[in-house]
Amino acid sequence: MEHEDPRNGESPHRSSKKPKFSSNYIPESEIRDEFSHHQPRVARINNGSFGSCPGSVLAAQRRWQLQFLRQPDAFYFNTLRTGITASRMIIKDLINADHVDEVSLVDNATTAASIVLRQIGHSFAEGKFKESDTVLMLHCAFQAVKKSIQAYVTRAGGSVVEVRLPFPVNSEEEIISEFKKSITEGKSNGRKIRLAIIDHITSMPSVVIPVKELVRVCREEGIDQVFVDAAHAIGSLKVDVKEIGADFYVSNLHKWFFCPPSVAFLHCKKANASSDVHHPVVSHEYGNGLPIESSWIGTRDYSSQLVIPAVLEFVNRFEGGIEGIMERNHEQVVKMGKMLAESWGTNLGSPPEMCTAMIMVGLPSRLCLNSEEDASRLRSYLRDCHEVEVPIFYQVPKDGEDGVRDNDGCITGYVRISHQVYNTLDDYEKLRDAINQIVKDGKTCKMLCIE
């Protein structure tokens, strides 16, 4: 029998406890108090970018910070490791991992991408992979992931194949079909696909990807490893890493799980836990396994990793806990998306079942949003002149295709709206009215002036 590393903190006698939900659920007034540090009057419908942290969790974070500052040595030797282990145990149970030593806490999904792609790059550089071999990724992958591929893979001789996903999208089958086509391209001329990177929820445009089905396709096609970039997942949809079956799965905890920035978990299947996977910041724990390496990367503030038990207490004040929050956020964002689309005479970017707590809503074509610069200008105008914070997506028209149209022309711009527990109807009406006013005034994106 293998000996457990006591630093991983799991005992064979540990009992599995279900979360306890309060019989007196958090009232609206307390929700307002928890987020009273948000800037007043701003329609904050962009939780997807940076997340949100309630006041009770911020207070818990401050207590951890002060505990370290009072007596750093005692904190390091007696408290830090057990605190991080307790947080990892909570994540293990939430994502249905087999063992706590499959779960590492890192800064964010960008760090996790660097960890995974670094070991792929080393295999190219050391000649384990042929230069003709490739990495498969979605064309709308997060820009930081693309940069990591550039830094670690292409400079070491590897190539990249991008899956062109349709948008607006009407069904999961459209995505699966495009994915299979790109696998065929990636395997052409005797090449091997060494890694497939799949988003669970794409960022811009935001769409839920059928990851379980795509991972299954990867296994059938003999792709070496699968990395799921699920930056937006935990707290917005159910995560079951055993059911998904990827080799690596990362999700930020500060986006939809109410942690302070920044912290994410990286799940590595047990088969990969002892392989050449290391934290990019090398410190004293190098070689002791990724979870232990990640728990100490030098003197820094580890409080965002330590507050996860406090986050669990916060979400369990809501009816249904985190599952109830996810369900209500989804229902509300779909409702708000439909309200906006009806007011503007446009469309949703995907069916409701292909979104979570974020949804894409078409903007009126009369805005003439024809470039990334137009999207940036409109976003800044809404922020500075209407106190509305919302991301804008420019949909590049395809050659020979009209795309989706409203009564006045082709829709080339979309807003990505989010819903979190602090949002109200007023936030979305503020966005609706701002866009309607721009159209009523006969202005286009290029005409908007920011004082």
Image (spheres, rainbow, N blue to C red):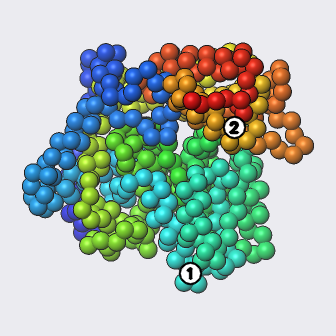
Q: Nearer the viewer, residue 139 or 385?
A: 385
Q: Amino acid at mark 1?
A: Ala
N-terminal of the pair, mark 1 or mark 2, is: 1
Residue 23 x, y percent position in the rendering: 26, 19
Q: Amino acid at mark 2?
A: Asp
Point out the image quarter for the N terminus: bottom left
Instruction: Tell me which corner region of the image, top left, top right, bottom left or bottom right, holds residue 296.
Output: bottom left
- Residue sitting at 72 percent across and 33 percent down? 446
Residue 403 x, y percent position in the rendering: 82, 35
Q: Nearer the viewer, residue 346 or 191?
A: 346
Q: Is residue 389 visible?
A: yes
- Horizontal relation, residue 401 to residue 304: left or right: right
- Residue at which label 1 appears: 125
Q: Give the label on residue 374, or none.
A: 2
Mark 1 vs mark 2, foreground winner is 2
- Horizontal relation, residue 316 to residue 276: left or right: left
Instruction: Tell me which corner region of the image, top left, top right, bottom left or bottom right, holds residue 166.
Output: top right
